[in-house]
Image (cartoon, grey):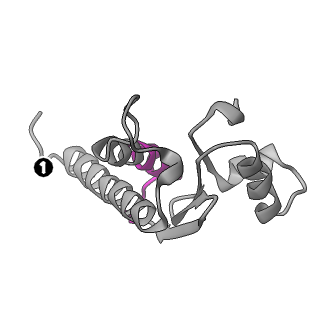
Amino acid sequence: MLSRSGIVTLSDDDLAWLRPGDRPADAIRWLMSRGPAILIVTDADTAATAYTRGGSVRIRAHRAVGTDPAEWEDAFVAGLLQALRARDLLDCGTDRSLRSVGLDDLRAILHDANLHVAQAITSATEHQAGYLDV
């Protein structure tokens, strides 16, 4: 499955589960050698690091007090897919490829995904507090 995946996202806990006993750097090298163009490892709700064959980019997370790490990760992945789609990187038949994404573009993609998290969490918090009408 890894060899057919363009993008792999997992948490640092998932990485430890997948490669028990490996140092994180060794587990990441193992995963990247299996074929994904982009590997993204989230660190609970504090950071995300994206890896390509050309290097890596790390961003700090937008955090909200009381937010569950799983909620953060779900919102991050939704934002990631939205950011990739906005750049035509998920469309079949386009001339852009996930393998051609540079580190500056990858940093911008992660930034957009992170903004999506902040917006989603703020919106959910306001809704729960009764600020939004549905």
In the image: residue 108, left or right of residue 106: left
Over which residues does the magenta segment extend?
62-78
Q: Is residue 88 above or below residue 46?
A: above
* Point 47% across, 71% down: residue: 60
Counting the numbered discs, the total is 1
Q: Quadrant of the C terminus?
A: top left
* Residue closest to the far right: 21
Q: SS for tag 1?
A: loop
Q: In this rendering, does residue 70 appear at all?
A: no
* Point 26% across, 54% down: residue: 119
Image location of residue 63, percent across then percent down? 40, 65
* Point 71% across, 51% down: residue: 32
Image location of residue 75, percent across then percent down? 40, 46
Q: Quadrant of the N terminus?
A: top right
Depth check: give the residue in front, 64 or 100: 100
Depth check: give the residue in front, 45 or 5: 5
Q: In this rendering, does residue 92 appear at all?
A: yes
Corner quadrant of residue 81 = top left
Image location of residue 17, percent across then percent down? 79, 46
Please say whether residue 120 is one of the residues in the magenta stretch.
no
Depth check: give the residue in front, 21 or 64: 21
Corner quadrant of residue 93 = top left
Q: Amino acid at mark 1?
A: Tyr
* Residue closest to the far front: 95
* Residue at numbered disc 1: 131
Neighbours of disc 1 within 10 Å: few (<14), some (14-19), many (20+) = few
Image location of residue 77, percent across then percent down? 45, 45
